[in-house]
Amino acid sequence: MKPTLNHLRQPIGELLENWSPALIPQNSILNGQFCRVEPLNVDSHMSELYEAFTKDSKNKIWTYLPYGPFEGSALFSEWMQNYCLRNDPMFFAIIDNVSSKAVGMASYLRIQSEVGLIEVGHINYSSSLQRTIAGTEAMFLMMQNAFSKLGYRRYEWKCDSLNRRSRRAAERLGFTYEGTFRQATIYKKRNRDTSWYSIIDKEWRALEQAYLEWLSFGNFDSKGKQKVKLSFFIDIYRDKI
C-alpha cells in the first residue's frame, strides 16, 4: 500500500477524516459465559482476592509486579484503598461464574481517549484463574469493551521482558510484538527492559470472531477441555484482515 503524499511530495500518515475521540471507560460490569469483569470494590473483593492470591505460597505471582506480596490482609486492603480506586489505572476484579468469587484482577491504564490509546495491565491471576477459559474470556471482554463499545484504536500490553509467561500470554491472545525498550524503568530496585505488544482496531474484527469461535460451547468437552486452540482460530481470521 503506497503512502499518502502531501503537497510537498512527502509521505504522511493516513488521514482519519471520520475519527472522533474514544469514550473514557466507565465503572460498568462486563458479563461473559465463564466470568464477569466488574469494577474493583475493596469491601466486596478484598477478602476473596487475598484468599485466592495467598494460595500461591511461594508468591510467584508478585515477582513482576511493582508491588506485593503483602504480609497480611490489612496491608493488602490498605494498598487497594490507596492505589486501586483511581480512574487511571482503573482496576477490575475478575469473578469466576462457577464459584462467584473474585479470583483475579486487571486494569485499564494510560488511557488517552483523545487519540484512541488504552493499555491493559496490572494483571494478576490467582492459581484458580490461571490456564482457564474464564481467564482468557476476561481478557477478551476487556478488549471487546475497549474496541467495540468505547472506540479505541490501539490496545497495548507491556511486560518485563524477562516475564516469559506474560510474553507468551500476549502472543497467545493475538497481540503483535513491537519491540523491547531497554532500561525502560526500575521497580523493586531492579532494572526492567519492557516488551511492547499491541492490537489495533483494523485487526479487531477478525480477532473478535476468532475469540467467539473459541469461546463457543461446542469447542469444549464436558470437562471444560478445549477441542481447538485459540491460536488456530486467530491464524484463520488473521488471514482475512
Image (spheres, rainbow, N blue to C red):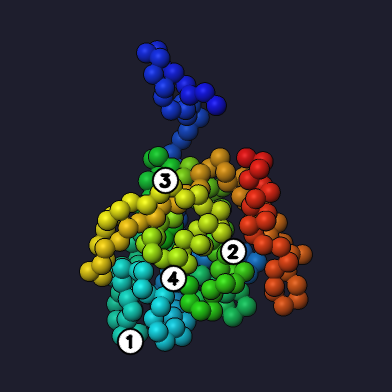
Q: Against 129, is 204 above or below?
A: above
The amino acid at mark 2 is Glu
Instruction: State how far apart marks 1 and 2 are (Cα).
Output: 30 Å
Q: Residue 137, which numbered label?
A: 2
Q: Residue 46, which numbered label?
A: none
Tag 1 and tag 2, C-beta contact below 8 Å: no
Residue 156 in view, yes or no: no
Question: Residue, x 58% and y 46% (percent of image)?
Answer: 204
Position of residue 38 measured from the top left corner of the image (x, y, whole percent): 50, 66
Disc 4 target residue = 124
User: Sequence order check: which comes first, mark 2 or mark 3?
Assistant: 3
User: Sequence order check: which comes first, mark 3 or mark 4?
Assistant: 3
Disc 3 target residue = 117
Estimate how packed mark 1 is, as few (under 14), some (14 to 19) or many (20 or more) residues with alpha carbons within 10 Å.
few
Describe the element under mark 2 as helix, strand or loop.
Answer: helix
Position of residue 17 measured from the top left corner of the image (x, y, whole percent): 48, 26
Disc 1 target residue = 72
Estimate how packed mark 2 is, as few (under 14), some (14 to 19) or many (20 or more) residues with alpha carbons within 10 Å.
many
